Amino acid sequence: MAEPIAAYRVRGPFAELTRARIRELTREPEALFWVFVFPILLTAILGLAFRSRPPEALPVAVVEGPLADARLAALAKEPDLKPNLLSEEDARQALVRGRVVLVVSSGETPVYSYDPTQPESRAARLAVDAALQHAAGRADAFAAGSAPVTEPGSRYVDFLVPGLLGMNLMGTGMWGIGFSLVVARNGNLLKRLVAAPVRKSHLLGAQLTSRLIFLIPEAGALLLFARFALGVPFRGSLFLLAAVALLGALAFSGLGLLVAARPRTIEGVSGLMNLAMVPMWIFSGIFFSTERFPATIQPFVQALPLTALNDALRGVMLQGIGLVPLLPEFAVLAVWGVVSFLLALKFFRWQ
Amino acid sequence: MPNTASALRCKDLVKRYGETVAVAGLDLEVWRGECLGMLGPNGAGKTTTVEIFEGLRVPDSGLVEVLGEPWRGNGFALRARLGIQLQETKFSDKARVSEVVILFRSFYPRGLDVADVLALVGLEEKAGAHVRTLSGGQKQRLSLACALVGDPEVLFLDEPTTGLDPQARHQTWEIVEGLKARGRTVLLTTHYMEEAARLCDRVAVVDYGKVIALGTPRELIASLGAEHVIEFAVGEQPEGADFHGLLRALPSVEGLAHDGVHWRLTVREVHRAVPALLAALAERGAEPLHLATHHATLEDVFMNLTGRRLRDG
């Protein structure tokens, strides 16, 4: 019986180079973990750690004495306060260790001991004083109403998801491009490819294309998880969101190419990767707002590509803003992408 | 007989790396249809010369012609006519053997069928295996498959069997012999004299960036003037210069070399030289150690020309 002859289908060089690169990624379980699982895991864990909780009662101490019972009873009526009866020494210890945020002395006219730099202590000062004044007979001038607000989009996890998406686009873009190029250079594969009739534009273009193809499941997985498991809002246009992610991925691919332009070893490229990425992990508002940095370093912070990407992602997702207000961010990303790509081509070591 | 039109030609080729002169005015011509071997020790400039022919390096000076053309621009059209095996290429670990060959096939406008190439290098059984699972010899044959898949007019093999075990080496030799039988032009570099002797129509002996001898293996060995070599060492070194003279004066001796430990006599007739040698040593009270004789090889040619061995040890 004749064996069926295996027919090998050969596509064009660009398609084959792109397929080869995608196979490298999809057959690497570790790469799949870092690209797909890790950001979702991180979002879930941080979302859990910083989940919105009902406001907790503030622990305060009342020092033992003749008036202590009456004060305790008055404070116990306040839902926002959790009073404890303690000896003077224990109360002092509790305050120092942060187990209570305020101590009411035993004297006839109470003295409040608290740390005025702590917002919780200041809140306790107001609540305790009001409760004790009421108990002593003070009347309210009027009874103000309360309207609690728990709007989705103002939670920490809502702030976090666009930042993590930006961080992931940076990591995958830079590592995805840089690592494989340096491995290929180190193993003489790049030299072998250059010796063949292969266009350099095809070699690099295939890297970029496979990166962009990978972007779809990568960003999709995190965003679907955020939308359906965490209820993170999507206020802006999905098309604009995709455009921001695409531009971000391209900018970081350019940077990845630049970082990988010269090194011959994995150790060499790892050092450069960290040099490029660590400042952005710190300054680009992944986990907290960039507004916390002093005004003097804001020009540096705002010029970083990840800052621009995170701001644009948050703007589209959380605020639902359109294209025009995002143009400065688009410009920052485009400049980084184009300049790093051109520099990378100029300095690229093919062998 | 090989067609005398040249496939590769270089003249006065010079390449320096900083202070080091890798190629120092090298002349070489490879005819179409022949297998020419560059034989020489590590660092002799073989790989640099080959990489200049391959268009991977630019010489500092000298003339280079590949298939009658110089390297110009990216040499795209010329590259499509060459097959290249580098000393070592690490293909992606997770790729399958067939996928690597398909990738390389896609670069060439015309070439061989992927299945045929896999059969040619004996990897058809491994077509679906990941590169990671291949032995050193199989990886080398995969690299050979990538060099062949474009059906090249000239094939460059840079140390194709270095680091392989004897069985894998013999497999590679058989493949190259098959290619020779199809009339391909091959330029190969090696520091194994058996490899050069077995595969090459002509051998260029290279040392310090120059061709120091060129000819068929038979011609090169014949240039020693004698076909046999006696190699020996002595327990206690006899006194200096007149020992040299004594050895040269022995019957049928044509050449003499000494590397500090071993003496090598190139002789026409072993049966006349050995008894005379033993008698001369006994007369001096020197005891011969490791006395051995063999047919002269390319290694002896190299030693005769340079006073050194091709390989250490």
Image (spheres, rainbow, N blue to C red):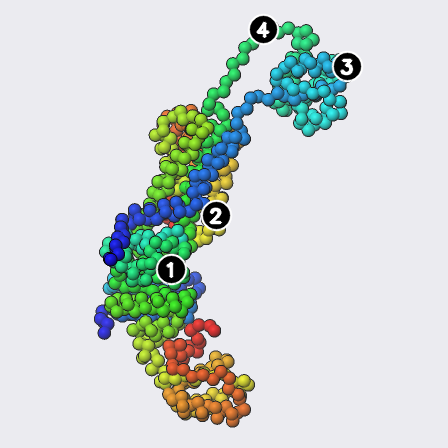
Q: Considering the numbered disc 2 on the image, is that residue within a helix, a strand or a loop?
A: helix
Q: Quadrant of residue B48?
A: bottom left
Say above or below: B19 vs A305.
Answer: below
Circle 4 residues within 10 Å: few <14, some 14–19, many ≥20: few
As drawn, which residue projects farthest toward the front?
A: A1
- Identify the residue position indicated by label 3 in the image: A66
- State which quarter of the image contains the C terminus of chain A: bottom left
- State which quarter of the image contains the N terminus of chain A: bottom left
Q: Considering the numbered disc 3 on the image, is that residue within a helix, a strand or a loop?
A: loop
| Dot 1 and dot 2 within a common chain | no
| Dot 3 and dot 4 within a common chain | yes
Q: Amino acid at mark 2?
A: Ser
Disc 3 to disc 4: CB gap under 8 Å: no
Q: Look at the image and tell me whether residue A340 can be seen.
A: no
- Identify the residue position indicated by label 1 in the image: B139
Label drawn at residue A180: none
Percent of width and height locating residue B44: 40, 69
Q: Considering the numbered disc 1 on the image, is that residue within a helix, a strand or a loop?
A: helix
Percent of width and height locating residue B291: 47, 84
Q: Residue at x 55, y 21 (%)?
A: A54
Q: Amino acid at mark 1?
A: Lys
Q: Select label 1 or label 2 by which is in front.
A: 1
Q: Select label 2 or label 3 by which is in front.
A: 3
- Identify the residue position indicated by label 2 in the image: A270
Residues at marks 2 and 3, CA–CA distance in whole angstroms: 68 Å
Q: Chain of mark 4?
A: A
Residues at marks 3 and 4, CA–CA distance in whole angstroms: 32 Å
Q: Select label 3 or label 4 by which is in front.
A: 3
| Dot 3 and dot 1 within a common chain | no
Q: Look at the image and tell me whether residue A176 can be seen.
A: yes
Q: N-terminal of the two: label 2 or label 4?
A: 4
Q: Chain of mark 3?
A: A
